[in-house]
Image (tube, helix red, strand yellow):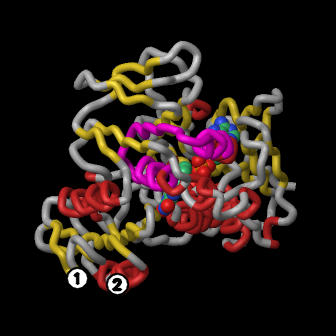
Amino acid sequence: MSAPIVVAGASMAGLRAAEQLRAAGWDGPVTLVGDEPHMPYNRPPLSKEVLAGKAPFESLALRPRASVADAEWRLGTRVTAADLGRRTVELDDGTVLPYGGLVVATGMRPRRLHCPGPLAGRHTVRTLADARGLRDALTRPGVRVVVVGAGFIGCEVAATAVALGAAEVTVVDPLPLPMVVPLGELLAEALLRRHEQRGVRFALGTGVTAFEGDEHVTGVVLADGRVLSADVVVESVGSVANTEWLEGNGLDLTDGVLTDEHLRVGGRPDVVAVGDVARFPNARYDGVPRRVEHWSIPADTAKHAAGAIAAHLAGTEVALAPFAPLPTFWSDQHDFRVQSFGAPALGRDDVRVLEGDLDGDVLAGYHTGGRLVGVVALGGRAAAAAAARYRAELLKQPTLTA
Ligand SMILES: Cc1cc2nc3c(=O)[nH]c(=O)nc-3n(C[C@H](O)[C@H](O)[C@H](O)COP(=O)(O)OP(=O)(O)OC[C@H]3O[C@@H](n4cnc5c(N)ncnc54)[C@H](O)[C@@H]3O)c2cc1C
C-alpha cells in the first residue's frame, strides 16, 4: 500500500484538503493529525452567534463529505517535527509517520500581549474552549469589558459583548480607527461611528502597557496614562503561525509557510500548504506572497493544492494555471455586515463610494492605478448583495503586475 498523504492540522483547511484529494483522484490512504480533541468545526460563529448564545456550540461542526469516510483521524495529537528529506513527521506520542505527500494545514494561534500583570480574566478567541470560557465571563452581570485590538475579531467581540448586556465595552488600539488596515479611512470612520452609536467606546491611538490586579485583572493601563476598569479583557491583537514543527527544513517560515504559485512548499512537489498558514502569491494581484485569513481561503487553497499534489503523486503532472483566488470576507457586527470581495487593502488609498451613503447602506470601491481591486459593503443585506454583484467585474479585471 502507498504511504499516506498526511494532513497536519485537522480543521477547516485540513478537512477541505482531504476532500479535494479525493475529488482530484487520490484513492490512497489519508491521515489527518490535529491537536484539538474535536472533529473540524467552523470558527466564525465563535465571536458572533455562538458567543452571543444565538446558536449552540454543536452547530459549529463541519460535516465531512462521504469521500473521506475512510480517512484516519488522529485527534488530540500534535505534529512536533517534520523531516521533508526523509518524508516523515513526528507526533507528540512518539510515532514517526512516513508520508507520500504532506499537507501543511496548521493555521494560526492568537498573539498574546506580553505586558506585566495578572493573566486571569484575559481571553483570546480562536478555539471552542476559548469561546466557552469567554461566554461564561461575558454573561456575568455588570461586567466591564476591554477589547484590545480593533481588527475584525475585536470589533465582533465588542458588538457581541454589548448584545450580551455588558455594563461597559471599550476597544483599545494604537491605530486611529477600527479595521483601518483592510478598510482604509473612509469606511473605518463609518464603522467607528456605527459602533459608538451602538454603545461601544474606543480608546484609539494608544496601546496597553500593563494590566492591573493581583490574581485577576481589574484594569488596563494605557500608554497615554489612562486606566480602564475591566473584569474581562479580550486580546485580539493578531495571530502567530503554527509552523515551529517545520523548522530545520530550510523553509521560509517568516510569516506562515511560503509557497509557490501552486501552494507547493520549499520547491517540493510532495508538500503543499493550505488555509491561514499558507503565504502564497496571488496571480490575480501583484504576485507578492501574503497570508489571507479569510474563511473562503481553506476551500480555495485546498482545491488548488490537492490538484497539484495528487497529479504529482499519480505521475501525471499537468500544467496548472497559477493560483489566483478572489478573496471573500464578511464580518457581522451589531445589526450590520461588512462584506468584502477582492483585495481592498491594496486599493485603500483610492476609495470611492459606488452606491449608497456612509451613514446608511454603503458600497465602496478600492482602486489601484485607477483599476478596481476590491469592493466593501457596510450595512444590511441589500449592501452585501450589492457587493456580490461586483464579483464578476472583479474576476474580469486584468491581473496587476508587481
Ligand atoms: C473567532 C474567529 C472568527 C472568524 N470570523 C470570520 C468571518 O466572519 N469571516 C471570515 O471570512 N473569516 C473569519 N475567520 C477566519 C476563518 O475562520 C479562518 O480563516 C479559518 O478558520 C482558517 O482555517 P484553517 O484550517 O486554515 O486554520 P485553523 O482553523 O487555525 O486550523 C488549524 C488547526 O491545526 C491545529 N494545529 C496547529 N498546530 C498543530 C500541530 N503542530 N499539530 C497538529 N495540529 C495542529 C490547530 O489547533 C487547528 O485545529 C474567523 C476566525 C476566527 C478565529
Question: Where in the figure is residue 135, as x and y percent of width and height?
Answer: 63, 46
Left or right: where 225 falls relative to 328:
left
Give, as a three-letter code, the residue at label 1: Glu
Q: Is residue 238 located in the magenta-colored stretch of the structure?
A: no
**What's the distance in space between the residues labelled 2 and 1, CA to CA?**
8 Å
Give the residue at mark 2: 386
Q: Which mark is residue 355?
A: 1
| Residue drawn at the location 21% of the way across and 71% of the way down | 358
Q: Nearer the viewer, residue 71 or 140?
A: 140
Q: Visible in this render: residue 252?
A: no
Q: Which residues are magenta?
A: 132-161
Quarter of the C terminus within the rendering:
bottom left
Question: Where in the figure is residue 252, as x and y percent of width and height?
Answer: 44, 37
| Residue drawn at the location 54% of the way across and 38% of the way down | 124
Q: Nearer the viewer, residue 51 or 63?
A: 51
| Residue drawn at the location 30% of the way across and 44% of the way down | 202
